[in-house]
Structures are given as structure tokens and as C-alpha cells.
Image (spheres, helix red, strand yellow):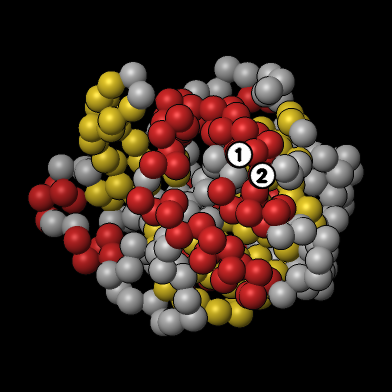
Amino acid sequence: MSSADSSEQGRKHFWRDFFDAHAPIYMENNFTRGTLAEVDFLVQELGLRHGARILDVGCGAGRHSVELARRGFRLTSLDLSGGQLRQAVAAAESAGVRPDWVRADATRFSFRPTHDAAICLCEGALGLLDHGEDPVEHDLAIFRNIRSALVPEAPFILTALNGYRTIRQITPDQVASGEFDPATMTQRITEDFDLPDGPKEMSYVERPFTPPELIALVESAGFDVVHVWSGTAARWERKPLDMDEMEVMIVAKAQETDGHEHTESSRGTGSVEH
């Protein structure tokens, strides 16, 4: 894997470091076991022709990208974590497929509008904040970058943490302690993780969104929202969102025009691994 784009040098990334450390055991998580059914769902909902180009933002270890490529789609697959991408490259080699792997920050990449669809799944950078980042601008930047990479009317499917579930679980003590900020919907969490190097206590910041907030962000980035469904990993189906679902799914379509000029190369910003 070549070095990251120079714009990333010197930036502190909790999530990059976390996923680099977690990468060797990422596919041991229970939620990764529904990949085939999830890709069945994606293929049905995206409705793409064979050979269509799909952008996978926050692709992680490549479980959706590799399976989509195996079914005949062309993938541009982006992630911040070099460790995760190394796992993805190995999985692709085992499957005999060759997505274009791009290492870049999802808030800072740029592609020409040559993609027929986009996915951003299982948080896939959404709501995963470094300390001090603006929670709204963070995700809005991701949505704008995705829209700029798509042809008009291209479908876009995302899943993100369900803010309703968070609100129903938060206690007054968590608000008083600053663990949860109801004004920004940001939650500061400290927990122990079992990593390949051993257990480690880590602190991080997440920002779940209520569906109306998420819809507003997606629409302001140049999409029309078509459906809001349950989106919890391994349980995707066309069903209304339950208040206690862990994740919400948004199915959207790129508007006819987005008003942006596209000056970057079709590979965009970031390092590429074939």
C-alpha cells in the first residue's frame, strides 16, 4: 500500500488508528456474517446493469466491495484505514477480483461524476468523529463528495446510527456528566476493546442522527430521498424503521444536477491500490 495523500499527513485520526489496529480481527465481528444477504439486497435495490461502476465509501475490509465485484460490478472502494484496505486487498485476491482501492479521508476525497451508484454502509465514516470535529459538517462533506462522484439519478444507499435509539437509552446522568450532549447529539464513549495486541481502553466520539436530520443532510448535498428503512446490519429489508433499531437506512437518488465543477482526475484524491 502506498503512502497516504499528502493532505492527510500530520492529521490525528482516532478512527484510522482504531481500524488499523482492529483490521486483523474485523471479519470476526458477528455483524459481518450477513454479507451475502446484504449484497443480495443491494443488487436488488440499486437495480444496476452488469458492469456498472459503484463507489463504496468506508469500505473497511471490503466485504461488500469484494462480493459486488464478484457479481460483475466495477468498484471504487475508499477507506481511511490502511490496515483495513490491506485486509480488503487480500480478500479480493482470494476471490479473483480487482476493485480500485483508494486510501483517503471520506470528508476530503474528490472524483469525477463517473459512478453509477454509491454505498456507505455500517457507519462507513458517517458519525465517526475525531475530537473537535463539527458533527454536521463532517457528514455533510461526505455526502457532498459522494454526490460529486455520481452521474445524475444514480442511486445511493447508506446506513447510519439511529438517533432515536440513542435518545431512548440516554439517562439524565449521562447528560449531566457531558457523556452525551443533547444540543449536538454527540456521545463520548470510553470502552475496552479486544485488539490483536491485547485489551485496550479507548475513548471516541459518535454522532447518531434522527432520520429527519439525516434526510435534510442528504437532500442538501444534492439527493432526493426515496425510502427510509430499517438498516441494522444483517437484517436489511423493506420494513419501516423501528425506534430501537441500531441503524437506519436511507435510499436516495442523485438529483439531475449538483452545480459542482469537477476538476480532479477520475481516481480523485488519495492513494490507489489495485
What's the distance in space between the residues labelled 1 and 2, CA to CA? Answer: 6 Å
The answer to whether residue 84 is above or below residue 69 is: above
Q: Position of residue 202 (x, y in %)?
A: 29, 29
Q: Quadrant of the N terminus?
A: top right
Which residue is disc 2 drawn over? 95
- State left or right for residue 250 relative to residue 244: right
Q: Residues within 10 Å of mark 2 (few under 14, many from 20)?
A: few
Within the image, what quadrant is residue 151 found in? bottom right
The circle drawn on residue 91 is: 1
Q: Quadrant of the C terminus?
A: top right
Q: Quick one: SS at disc 2?
A: helix
Q: Residues within 10 Å of mark 1 (few under 14, many from 20)?
A: some
Judge by depth and name the residue closer to the eye, 93 or 155. 93
The answer to whether residue 244 is above or below residue 202 is: below
Q: Amino acid at mark 1?
A: Ala
The residue drawn where x is 28% and y is 41% is: 188
The residue drawn where x is 19% and y is 57% is: 170
Q: Position of residue 260 (x, y in %)?
A: 82, 56
Instruction: Tell me, yes or no, whether the two marked residues, 1 and 2, touch with CB atoms within 8 Å.
Output: yes
Residue 74 visible (yes or no): yes
Judge by depth and name the residue closer to the eye, 32 or 3. 32
